[in-house]
């Protein structure tokens, strides 16, 4: 349901729910409300995890914030990699770093980011043909497509990994 609220923005039920709970924007920081249904409260309790598991798929690059949004896979928000001088322009969008010819503005990128991050950006086409517009997707899924079974498997793997770490640390403890 959380994923559909982010990706099915034109669906009638999404518009109604977002309107009912006064939720604005494509990827709101929080959705918690005082007077809400049990379902909405449950969703708002998981909202930070839902946001962490989304990534922007680059299309026309007009919606994505260059510094604060997660759009470079395996890197995360670029704000933490800033090496430029002065303050970060928090309003910079990805489209502001694309030249008129549709390629990355390498001279700008080289003054703001370390080489290893620039190499990751180089793997992304600034104007992706397969996506007409920027859109949100699951960051750990192939091509960002949501499937309930794969989502369940992902979270179960994470849970099992956490349990394994706890159990293995118990066996490594020295005992008297």
Image: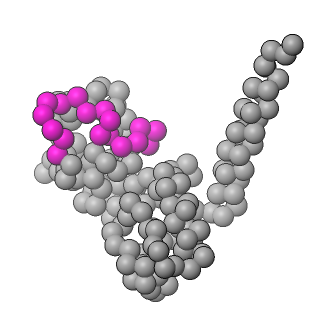
Q: Is residue 104 left or right of residue 18?
A: left
The residue located at (34%, 61%) in the rendering is 134
> What segment is highlighted magenta in the picture?
73-89
Q: Main secondary structure of the magenta part?
A: loop
Residue 72 placement (x, y as % from top left): 38, 43
Is residue 11 visible in the rendered structure shown here? Answer: no
Q: Is residue 35 visible?
A: yes
From the viewer's side, name the closer residue of 81 and 28. Answer: 28
Q: Does the stretch in magenta take in 111?
A: no
Q: Position of residue 54 (x, y in %)?
A: 47, 55
- Residue 146 lies, with reference to residue 40, above or below; the image says above
**11 vs 51: above or below:** below
Q: Residue furthest front?
A: 176
Give the tally of numbered discs: 0
Q: Is residue 91 above or below residue 120?
A: below
**Left or right for 152, reference 110:** right
Nearer to me, 25 or 31:
31
Residue plotted at (43% across, 79% down): 21
């Amino acid at each position: 349901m959380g994923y559909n609220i982010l990706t099915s923005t034109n669906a009638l039920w999404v518009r109604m729910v977002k309107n009912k709970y006064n939720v604005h924007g494509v990827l709101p920081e929080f959705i918690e409300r005082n007077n809400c249904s049990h379902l909405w409260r449950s969703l708002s309790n998981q909202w930070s995890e839902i946001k962490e598991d989304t990534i922007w798929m680059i299309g026309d690059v007009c919606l994505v914030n260059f510094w604060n949004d997660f759009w470079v896979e395996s890197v995360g928000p670029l704000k933490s990699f800033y090496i430029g001088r002065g303050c970060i322009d928090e309003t910079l969008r990805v489209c502001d770093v694309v030249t008129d010819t549709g390629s990355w503005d390498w001279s700008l990128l080289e003054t703001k980011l370390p080489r290893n991050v620039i190499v990751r950006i180089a793997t992304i086409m600034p104007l992706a043909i397969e996506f007409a517009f920027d859109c949100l997707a699951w960051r750990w899924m192939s091509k960002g497509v949501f499937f309930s079974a794969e989502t369940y498997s992902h979270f179960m793997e994470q849970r099992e990994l956490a349990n394994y770490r706890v159990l293995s640390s118990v066996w490594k403890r020295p005992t008297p």
